[in-house]
Image: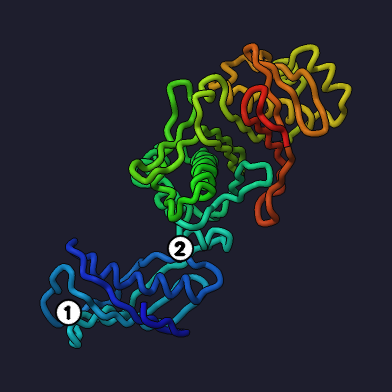
Amino acid sequence: MHAVGDMHVRGQVVTPAAKGALLDNALQLIGNWILTTQATRTVALPVRLGKVSFYGPHPAAGTVVECVCRISTVDHEQIVGNCQLVVDGRLWAQIDGVVDRRFDSHPTARPAERFPSRYHMSEPQPEGWTLAYDYWTDLVTRGMAARGILGAAGALEYERKPPAGRKSWLLGRIAVKDAVRFRQWAAGHRDVFPIELTVTNEPNGRPRVAVRPGKGLVECDVSLAHSADIGVAIARPYTEKAQEGGVGIDVAEVKPVEESTVRFALTPGEQDLLAELGDRDRWFTRFWAAKEAVAKAEGTGFGGRPRDFVITAHGPHGLTVAANGRTYQVAHREVGNPPDLPSRRYVVAWTWGPETGPVT
């Protein structure tokens, strides 16, 4: 890009080998103009071309093409402009009536959309885990984010999910990729793209994040969770001890709880403790999230038996949970949606592993 003005942009495009790619790449200059000059609704997709005129043979692959794009009109819904493509000082093609439809975009997500290798979609938390909020108000921008963050194979997996569950599933993937990327950046690695990390699940359901080979990236033990409008994740450098109990995290929305759910999830002793603590719905959510975090750390999940994971103590910093002969310290914190999302409160509970896991 040579210059960006109030209503124009100039730059160069190197002719690709694929048919049609040169015109498409030239129109990307308008997309860059939108990102650079507009404060809101910076996601735009071309929906119509009025007329394309050619004045010579198609440039060979590798040819440098000078491009000038002028913006005619800008409003809330669309941007209209035209582009001239010049080869060796002569006009090769002109595109008139380029119409880009605009979509909502969240200012928090803009840096990661423009420079995904250097910026994150999730927010690192003081205790070491990550939190991702839903930044997308329509299916178009969410789908674009899914492709950019997940890569081709991950985007197909996203599309196969039931529509109602796609958002939460994506938020969990965003959070866990960023949790691992924070570990890479802390280790001195730079320019780590989200698509260089592949999220899979082991047969027992435990998530794994495979890093791109050949770059010396840090392998991590991970856990993720999602609820409503948020996704959370935790990551630590992988050790063999993770086989005996790894990290675990869960998030649960604070809601009124039925008595039948309490009896199903809690042992008689836990039910007595819940009754003593007061604020029944909030404390039950803490108990449930802590149990779930430990079940994930164990690599088993609940398996329909939440009472196998027993709250044995509580304190100002968290809960103690016993499972399979091991003891976990589980911290918890309450978080809420930002003002631009529905009003909801959640409990996030996490553990760094059995016995030696710090509670902060």
Q: Is residue 337 above or below residue 273?
A: below
Q: In the image shown, does 256 or 182 lie closer to the viewer?
A: 182
Kind of residue at badge 2: Arg
Q: Residue at x 63, y 32 (%)?
A: 250
Q: Position of residue 316 (x, y in %)?
A: 82, 33
141 and 90: which is toward the camera: 90
Task: For marks 1 and 2, give the CA distance.
Answer: 31 Å
Quadrant location of the C terminus in the rendered image: top right
Q: Position of residue 196 (x, y in %)?
A: 39, 46
**Which amino acid type is marked by label 1?**
Phe
Residue 216 image point, x, y percent:
39, 43
Tag 1 secondary structure: strand
Residue for point 30% across, 80% down = 83
Q: Which residue is mark 1?
A: 54
Q: From this viewpoint, is residue 249 visible? A: yes
User: Looking at this view, is 184 or 230 the one in front?
Assistant: 184
The residue labelled by disc 2 is: 114
Q: Count up the numbered dots.
A: 2
Depicted 261 relative to depicted 110: above or below: above
Of labels 1 and 2, earlier in sequence is 1
Q: Secondary structure at mark 2?
A: helix
Q: Write the residue at 32% across / 72% down.
A: 27
Residue 284 in which image quadrant: top right
Please tell me in which quadrant of the rendered image residue 73 appears. bottom left
Mark 1 or 2, closer to the camera: 2
Of 244 and 231, the residue lying toward us: 244
Q: x%, y% of residue 5?
A: 44, 84
Quadrant of the rendering where the N terminus is positioned: bottom left
